[in-house]
Image (cartoon, rainbow, N blue to C red):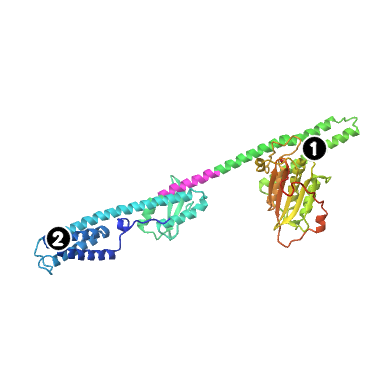
């Protein structure tokens, strides 16, 4: 922010030009000399010397004591030459002329001293104001919404403008200046908080002003900014620890229930089997219980491993070409082996996608598992079509739907809707894992739902290039066509709570 300078005509910092002062002095003396001629008939000539005083005072006020004294001498000479006998001569016949000259000089000196003092006070006040503005700007930059690394270059530019140099540097560590630089250490108590680097072309007065006025304010603001940055880091770390604790608690809760339930079912079924005289019916029943519980246990362990990979940040998707139809078919076969619920429809000519087919299969497997779980054996419609530079997959079910409040939370790990009954087995991991894998592959997922009318999950996956290979129409037509759903066109049918 450029500093504002008061007008020199208001006794602010600075003076009008000396040339202007000289012209005004000459004009003022000439006017005073002319004014005296008509006044000689009504007043003694010796008393009319006061007519020159306004010019002397005005020049002394605005141009200082030196030009004021010069104006006083010129005024006395003009008064003596044009008004006092002998006229047109600098000879002094009346000692009153000397008194007038002395009076002019005294007035000029006194006025100049007072004006210089007023100007000095005005310059000091203006300097203090600019320093206060600089401190306020530095506080706004370093303590505002920017990070300390982003704010330092801006603060350096503001310092350079305030000091009047071409460039300045503000560093957070101790810097050894070169021969063309001067370094001002910044400390807060015994702690070194940074270094201010300025060009060595600064004069002694400027260096003293920077050291006495700028550096103390900069030290306080920079120390406060560093303290604020440390507090923000601590807050972020505390929040991360809190989230980690919440996740651990959720994992333990899930482990204590979702892992214990299938294990308990397996142990109970095996314990109920007569070891000496097992009947074929008992063996078959135990086998079914163990298979169901073991499958549930394996899927839960798989999901926990997937979530661990996603949250550790170590996920590295592959970049292979794959068919979205094949991925969805594999996922549907895993979730619905009898092909009675999931109905897949792929638009002919849908392009191949580039990414990790295994991760996409697990993502869609979780989405379809969620939809089948809450569909109550009603059809789950999966429709695929190309939309611009993306392939859009829409998974629509006829479950109980999701309330608007819950839609913002369904993708959180371990979240299960309070309205989900005990008959719906789920760990609350499926949608979180699906979102993680889809986002890792450059895709996006969203949910639309109306309570009581189902849920629709929309997945947009990017297409690599514009002339990639295409899925054949025959392959797409081989998929079972999805029957019309009463709400399918409105895209507001859906999968129940995860």
In the displayed structure image, the side of residue 448 where residue 265 appears, left or right: right
Between circles 2 and 1, the one closer to the viewer is: 2
Q: Is residue 29 above or below residue 248?
A: below
- Secondary-structure class at tag 2: helix
Rendered image quadrant of residue 112: bottom left
Q: Which of pointers 2 and 1 lies earlier in the amino acid sequence?
A: 2
In the displayed structure image, the side of residue 266 where residue 251 appears, left or right: left
- Secondary-structure class at tag 1: helix
Residue 133 visible to the viewer: yes
Distance from Cα at disc 2 to Cα at disc 1? 122 Å
Outermost front residue: 486
Nearer to us in this view, 346 or 273 = 346
* Secondary structure, magenta segment, majority class: helix
| Residue 217 on the magenta segment | yes
Residue 452, given in percent of the width and then of the height, sits at 72, 40
Residue 359 visible to the viewer: no
Residue 239, given in percent of the width and then of the height, sits at 59, 41
Q: Is residue 444 above or below residue 261?
A: below
In the displayed structure image, the side of residue 296 where residue 121 appears, left or right: left
Nearer to us in this view, 319 or 106 = 106
List the residue tagged with mark 2. 48
In contact (CB < 8 Å): disc 2 and disc 1: no
Image quarter of the C terminus = top right
| Residue 138 on the magenta segment | no
Name the mark on residue 105. none
**Magenta segment, which residues?**
216-233
Outermost bottom residue: 88
List the residue tagged with mark 1. 293
Residue 386, given in percent of the width and then of the height, sits at 73, 56
Image quarter of the N terminus = bottom left
Rendered image quadrant of residue 48: bottom left
Q: Callout 1: 10 Å neighbours few (<14), some, many (20+)?
A: some
């Amino acid at each position: 922010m450029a500093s504002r300078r008061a007008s020199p005509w208001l006794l602010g910092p600075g003076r009008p030009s000396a040339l202007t002062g000289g012209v005004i002095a000459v004009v003022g003396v000439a006017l005073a000399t002319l004014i005296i001629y008509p006044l000689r008939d009504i007043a003694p000539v010796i008393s009319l010397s006061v007519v020159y005083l306004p010019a002397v005072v005005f020049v002394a006020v605005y141009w200082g004591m030196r030009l004021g004294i010069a104006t006083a001498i010129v005024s006395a000479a003009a008064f003596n030459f044009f008004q006092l006998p002998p006229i047109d001569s600098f000879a002094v016949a009346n000692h009153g002329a000397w008194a007038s000259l002395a009076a002019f000089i005294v007035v000029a000196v006194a006025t100049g001293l007072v004006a210089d003092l007023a100007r000095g006070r005005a310059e000091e006040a203006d300097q203090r104001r600019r320093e206060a503005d600089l401190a306020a700007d530095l506080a706004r930059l370093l303590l505002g919404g920017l990070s300390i690394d982003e704010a330092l270059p801006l603060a350096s530019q503001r310092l350079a403008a305030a000091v009047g140099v071409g460039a300045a540097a503000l560093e957070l560590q101790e810097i050894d200046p070169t021969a063309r630089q001067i370094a001002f250490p910044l400390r807060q108590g015994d702690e070194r908080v940074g270094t201010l680097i300025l060009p060595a072309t600064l004069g002694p007065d400027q260096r003293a002003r920077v050291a006495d006025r700028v550096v103390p304010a900069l030290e306080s603001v920079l120390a406060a900014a560093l303290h604020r940055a440390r507090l923000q880091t601590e807050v972020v770390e505390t929040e991360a620890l809190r989230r980690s604790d919440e996740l651990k608690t959720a994992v333990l809760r899930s482990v204590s229930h979702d892992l214990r339930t299938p294990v308990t079912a397996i142990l109970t079924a095996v314990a109920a089997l007569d070891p000496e005289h097992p009947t074929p019916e008992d063996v078959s029943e135990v086998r079914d219980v163990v298979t169901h519980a073991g499958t549930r246990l394996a899927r839960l362990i798989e999901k926990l491993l997937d979530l661990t990979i996603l949250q550790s940040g170590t996920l590295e998707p592959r970049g292979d070409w794959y068919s979205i139809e094949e991925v969805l078919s594999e996922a549907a076969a895993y979730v619905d082996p009898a092909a009675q619920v999931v109905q897949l429809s792929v638009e002919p000519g849908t392009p191949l996608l580039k990414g990790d087919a295994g991760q996409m299969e697990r993502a869609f497997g979780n989405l379809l598992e969620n939809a089948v779980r809450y569909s109550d054996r009603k059809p789950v419609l999966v429709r695929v079509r190309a939309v611009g530079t993306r392939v859009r997959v829409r998974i629509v079910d006829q479950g109980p739907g999701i309330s608007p409040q819950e839609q913002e939370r369904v993708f959180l790990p371990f979240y299960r809707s309070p309205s989900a009954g005990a008959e719906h087995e789920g760990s609350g991991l499926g949608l979180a894992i699906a979102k993680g894998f889809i986002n890792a592959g450059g895709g996006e997922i969203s949910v639309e739902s109306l309570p009581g009318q189902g849920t629709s999950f929309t997945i947009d996956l990017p297409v690599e290039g514009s002339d990639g290979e295409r899925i054949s129409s025959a392959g797409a037509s081989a998929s079972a066509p999805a029957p019309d759903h009463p709400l399918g066109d409105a895209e507001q049918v859906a999968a129940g709570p995860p």
